[in-house]
Structure formats: C-alpha cells, structure tokens
Image (cartoon, rainbow, N blue to C red):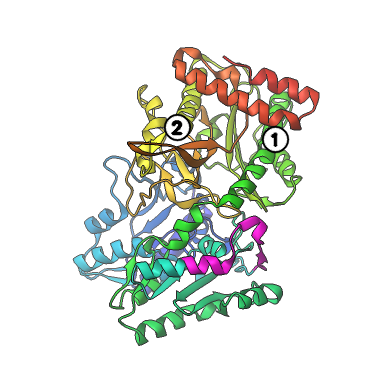
Amino acid sequence: METNKDVIIKDLRNLMKDSGVDYYICGSGDPHCSEYVNEHFKIRQFLTGFTGSNGTLVISKDYAGLWTDGRYYVQAAGQLPTIVEVVKAGQPGVPTIKKYLSDNLKTGETIGLNGFLTDALFYDDIRKVADEKGCSINTCFKPEDKLWTDRPGDSASAAFILSEEYTGELVKEKIKRVREYLSCRNADALFIGCLDDQMWLYNIRGNDIECNPVIYGYTFLTADKCIFFAKEQSVSGDVKEYLKNNDITVMPYENAYDYIKSYTESYKSSVILCDKRKLSAVFYELISKTAGPIYGLLPTEIFKAVKNETEIKNLKEAYLKDSVVVTRYIKYIIDNAGKGITEMDGARVIDRMRADIEGFIELSFPTISAYGPNGAMMHYEPSDDNPVLIDKDSFYLVDSGGQYMKGTTDVTRTVCTGEPSDEMKKDYTLSACAMLRLQNTVFMDGCTGRNLDIMARSVLWRYGMDYKCGTGHGVGHVLNVHEGPVNISWQKRAGGIEEPLKPGNTISDEPGVYREGSYGIRIENILLCKDAFKTEDGRFLCFEPLTLAPLDSKCMDKKYMSDEDIDNYNRYQELVFDKISPFLNEAEKAWLKNKTKPL
C-alpha cells in the first residue's frame, strides 16, 4: 500500500529528473550544523518520517537509503517507509555514503543538495568523489521549497542576558582570550557558525531551537572587530545595547554571506580559522578560496567546555535539585506502575516536577519515557497517538533533563517495575557496574575519551555484549545537552575529535544493554572532571558525580560483581542518601534508605 511518504519520494524523484539531479542528499542539519534543529529545518523528517537527530538520506532514481548510527537502528526501521532502506552506518561491511557514491556514480552525473544545510566536512568528502568520477554538485537544489507546502516558519526568538553571577566571566574577558588564541595560531580572523559557541561568547541565551537555549547568528572576529550577524527581533532593546557596550557590532543575519564573500575577495591572503564540522558548505567554498584558511577546533568550543568555578558551583546546585526530582519520580513510577499510567503520563509528571525547580527555563531535550521493548530504542519518544501502559513485568527507562539558570542537566535511570528475571538482573548489574567503574577511574592528564571508554565497555565485552553508541558526551552550562569537544567512545569516527579531558569538563557516563523486542537499560550519570593528585610520574585526574539518583537495588546481582564493584555501588548509594534525604519527607526518606542500603 502506497503511503504519504512514498508519494513524497515519488514527487521528489520527479523534481530531481526535471532539475538534472541524479543523486539527492539530505542530512539533518540547519545553516549552523546544529544537532537539534528548528521545525523549519526538519526536511529529512518531512521526506521520510524519521524523527531521529542523526540521519542522512540518499536518493537516486532507483534507490533510497537512510544512513544512521546505532542509536537509531530500531527507531528508523519502525518509522521509515518501506521504500527507504535503513543503512546501519559504522557496522562491518556497510559502506559510507562516500563509498556508496564512489561505487555508483557515473561520469557526468549530478549530485544535488542544499549547500546552506550541509556541513563542510561531509561536503568536502562528496566533492572529492564527484571530482574523481567526473561529476558535478548542485548546491542550490532545494526540493523542500516546492514539496513542503505547509512548512513551519523560521524562528527569531528574543535573546536574554546571562549575568556574571551565572557565567563567572565577562564578555570582554572572553573575547580577549579568543583573540589571544588567534594570535598564537597566527590567524587574522575567526568565523563561528556554531550557535552554542556564540551564546557562550556573548553570555546570552535564546529559544530558536526547542530545548537548546540559542538564537540564530554568525560571528566574524578579528583583532579589532567583533561582528555578530543576528536577526533584529532577537537582539533588540536591552540586548542590543548590551552588545554595543561590549564592543560588538550587530549586523543583519541575512548579510553574513555577502560580508564574508566581500571579505574573502578583498583579503585573499587572510588566515581565517573555522571548523569544518560546524561550517556550512557555502561558507566553506568562500573561505577555502583564501590563501590561508585554518580548519580545526575553535577556541570558543575549547574554552566553553572547561567550566569555571562559578559555573561548577551553579551546576552542582542545579544537579542536586534535579536529582531530588529524579529520586521522587523513581518512587512515583514504582508506586504507580500497573495502575493505568502511560509513558506519556510519566513524561508529563517528571516534566511538571522539573518545572517547579527554581530557575527552570525549559527541558534540555524531550523526555524519553520508555517501557519494555520501547526502551531498546535509544532515542525513543512517547506519544499520545500510541499510548503504552507502564505495567509491572519489565524495565521502564526514563532519560530526561532540564535547562536552568544555573545549568543543564541530563540523567537516565532504568527501573524494574516488577520482579526481574535472572537475565534482567545480569544486564542491569553489568550496566550499573560499567557506569560506576568509569565514574571511579583515576587517569593520567592527557587521556582522551577513547582511552577511557574501555573502563565501562569492558564490563560488557567480557560477556560478548556491547552497546551501539558512545559511552559519553560533553554537557553544556545553560547550553546544549550535547557539547564538544570531549566525548567517550572507543571508535575513531570520521571527523571525530579526540580532545584530552581537562578539569572543568562535564561529561556523561551512560553504558547500557539494549535487547530489541524486550527492553533497554541505560544508567547515566553526569561527571565533573577534576584534579586527583600529582606524583613523580605526573598529574592525575578523576571524576566527581554530579548526578545523585539511586540505582535499582532489586536488580543488582552480586555474582556478576567484584569486590571493587560492590564497594563502588555501596559508596555511591550512600552518597545519594546523604545528599538527597534532607530534601525528602519521612516516607520518601524511609523508601530511599531501603533503596540505598548496602549490598
């Protein structure tokens, strides 16, 4: 039976034929290479129905495939029309898009894409293939303009100022640090398209993308100029005056392209620093024509990831209050499972609880409330259109977080709502031990996340188990819940950054077990990297957990735990009780005392 999405893809192929496009590529991004995007830019979702944050659609006259990572294999299979194949990127024997095109392109054919919505790193790969095969690229192919007749409008929310009591550093101090970095790199200018980097630099926040407190803008910074291309509605009134007082020139958002074009034509020998991962193809084509572009990590991303003393103090307060809510919510689920509540009911409850916390702005991502088999989909979203009861015979997984004036939170807990089977206990115990082993790791200064991933993953590997995603991602401060440049993953990915962890980094620790058709387990704490000690052999770092929510003692099986694992578990549960119990009533305190008793 032909679906609406089948019809859309058929119409898309007709447009391709009329435009002389043989292969069409559509990713997930917006003009700023954001991971999560405004509704206006969810073009791939419109074309295919797939709602995940990562996926690239490739269509020819006789093939349609969507490349996505391990977080979304199950979800994509359930959402895509049958005409679109799920391509499991990163799996053995699965070609990259670059390899697929290299194998299938014929001389003289044309690849079509929207150059404003394609990142430079990916575009560079595609361009090399096109050149090798004698093909061309049309960067102005925008089928959404004709097919998406009810497309939502773009956003221009009003920015607000985040004062020094939250940021701990003034804008002029940040700009000075950035300019010093440019000087050390012998760069004349810095171009920033990444939205959260700019919000950090200017100490402002907004609401152009749901759950991401940012506004749209571009920044061009030299030794004597700092230009912020922004929408008038976003930086009017007090914000505009505030930017002016910090020697920041505001220009219209839509003027960014022409300004950079004029600059690169006038200063062909200029050295411009930019990041290919976060630079759209159209700007890349302009900057690459200068004599000395530098492609690499931006100072704003490096500096932003290292939280200062003020930010750390605020984050600890935010996580403590957030963890109290998560603890109360776990008790709510245990008390109410099997009584007619749905996944969406659960999501609404925890969302309301968070909204009552002082300084709450919004959620940091849509709450993942998943019961039974739905938990095996890493980024599952519950829906009233498909209500699922939270019953008493499986695992319930909740992955949620909030944006507060003092910080950004992200936490996952998995609870068995009934009596766990032996296999469920094994899977839960291994996940908990994996999380706690990484959390308790002491490591040499200079280690990257690829060095540390084994501390968590080896717990599962020794049983022939694995999870098809990274172990950890950086977390922002009143910014995006996924933040670079640090991450924890054993795999080296194309374009991936391996930046050493530094004191002040905040990073997630979230191993898990995902059994398709049965259940999913993920246990996620956010960790603060800090100094441990120094010896004659060097400087050593460690982690402090910011997340303080109980683990499910009912699911722990000591036969899968070493003495070290038992000690890790008992110390963490004791810490949770000590920190959380003062905020609970007597009934809640008694419940938590039982939940955190030592093994």
- Left or right placement of residue 383 versus residue 34 in this view: right
Q: Residue at x 35, y 75 (%)?
A: 287
Identity of the residue furthest to the front in this view? 536
The residue closer to the viewer here, 337 or 415, is 415
- Categorize mark 2 by other alpha carbons within 10 Å: few (<14), some (14-19), many (20+): many
Query: Is 598 located above or below residue 446 in the figure?
Result: above
Q: Which residues are magenta?
A: 157-177
The residue closer to the viewer here, 233 or 58, is 233
Q: Quadrant of residue 464?
A: top left
Q: Which residue is mark 1?
A: 324
Give the number of marks.
2
Image coords of residue 580 (percent x, y): 69, 31
Query: Is 131 located above or below residue 73 in the figure?
Result: below
Q: Which residue is mark 2?
A: 438
Image coords of residue 2 (percent x, y): 49, 51
- Tell me which numbered mark, 1 or 2, is placed earlier along the sequence: 1
